[in-house]
Amino acid sequence: MERIKGLFEFRALHTTLCILFALVIVPSNLKAVVIFLSALTILVVKIKNGFSIRKSFLLLNSSVYLLIVITLFYTTNFDYGIKKLSTMLSLGVFPILFSLFQKEEIIQVRKKYKYYLWIYIITVLLFNCISFLWFYFSNPNYDFPGIIEHFETIVRVDMGKFNIHPIYLSMHCAIAILFSFKILSTLVSKKAILLLLSIDIVLLSFILLYAKKGPIIALLLVFSLFLMFQRNKKHTKTHIIVVLCLVGVTVAIPKTRERFVELLKIENIQTGPITSTNIRYTIYDIAQDLIKKSPVIGYGIGDYNDTLIKQYKSDGEAILAIRKYNSHNQFFSLLLIGGIPLLIVFLLMIGVNLIYAIRYDNQLLILLLIFYCIVMFTENILERESGVIFFSFFINFFALFNNGLLENENSPNTQ
């Protein structure tokens, strides 16, 4: 009876994790509901069994959110602060939930490791393909070149509750390819390898379609790092070929080529053309001045963005003020919110997880941490629902395997 009960409860946890890995295809107005129901399921299972909290895990991975909450006490725009805290709530929720997982459950979850990765890969593939095909066949105003040209805008403004900024969709594609690296390294079936490589080609095509520099650069770097992990000289040739092909395709496609050409001449938008690179350069210049004025406590979660927009107006940057651009750099944003202490806590959270990931050969967590940190140099991932949910979920899920209690078990990298 106890065995049956335990099996039923693990199936509840397993089903919950499957749903969370498929969260990409859930509309934005239901994501919070799904996370709430998932959290409730995990809590009910744990309460019925009696539970203990891994305090060090919880404290480390929730520390950033806790410090951001503290900044609410010296903010003036309280309503905006509460709104941003609710958006960033995943930074507090997922550390709590995964801190409840104990050794036996982590071992069982690890046995399903590749299953979860497949779910995410397939859901990301379906979201991109179905969206593309739906608008191509249902809208007579778009021929194939037209849908190629405008799809980046379509996914951002024309998909209702499924709207998503292309930078985050590009990140999903890149992470799905990253997950496929791990699966490919364990496959022996030629058909399975061919299937996964075909999926990767489709996902890579969408990444090039969205033409976002950050995810492309991050993907190239983590791909190189992954091959280094394999310690197999045979992969070196493959690596060089793949990198050259990707660079070649990027250069050959006018849209992506233009995005990277921007990097050759970076200027303030008052003296140069209005490009995404120049906009970021101008924002960084303004953000750095604000950081210098309040380096210790920042401006608080309620006021940091208002302060930035006011500075845009003060500096005569009308375009930035009208469009209410955020800092477009997660590290600058953390400094604006909570000053140097908040940035240090964030870096400690990343650094400690990275150290343990290296210690226990937790390759996917290493690659994810590096991928996210690279993209954070140009995007505020933690302040958008599409970014913070998956960042917190993935980091906390894969950090489960940074566990000394599991040293005698098979590594997740062999599953």
Image: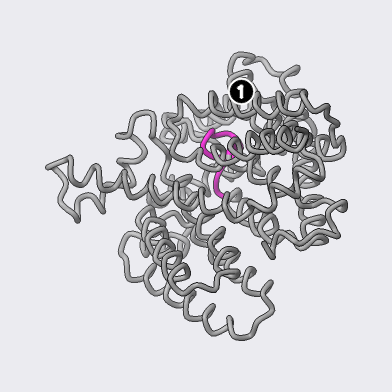
Dividing the picture into quarters, in which one does residue 209 lie?
Answer: bottom left
Residue at 26% x, 53% y: name it: 148
Residue sticking out furthest to the front: 1
As displayed, is residue 24 above or below residue 39?
below
* Residue 205 visible, this orientation: yes
Residue at 58% x, 34% y: name it: 383
Q: How is the image coloured?
A: one colour
Image location (x, y in percent) of residue 242: 47, 75
Image location (x, y in percent) of residue 86: 61, 23
Image location (x, y in percent) of residue 197: 44, 68
Residue toward you, 11 or 260? 11
Dot 1: element: helix
Residue at 64% x, 21% y: name it: 302
User: Looking at the figure, which quarter contains the N terminus?
Assistant: top right
The answer to whether 132 appears left or right of 409 in the picture is left
The span shown in magenta is 378-389
Where is mark 1, residue-wise? 86
Residue sticking out furthest to the left: 140
As displayed, is residue 97 above or below residue 228?
above
Residue at 86% x, 31% y: name it: 52
Query: Is residue 388 found inside the magenta-colored segment of the image?
Result: yes
Query: Is residue 363 found inside the magenta-colored segment of the image?
Result: no
User: Looking at the figure, which quarter contains the C terminus?
Assistant: bottom right
Residue toward you, 117 or 177? 117
Image location (x, y in percent) of residue 174: 50, 56
Magenta span: chief secondary structure: helix
The answer to whether 335 appears left or right of 274 in the picture is right
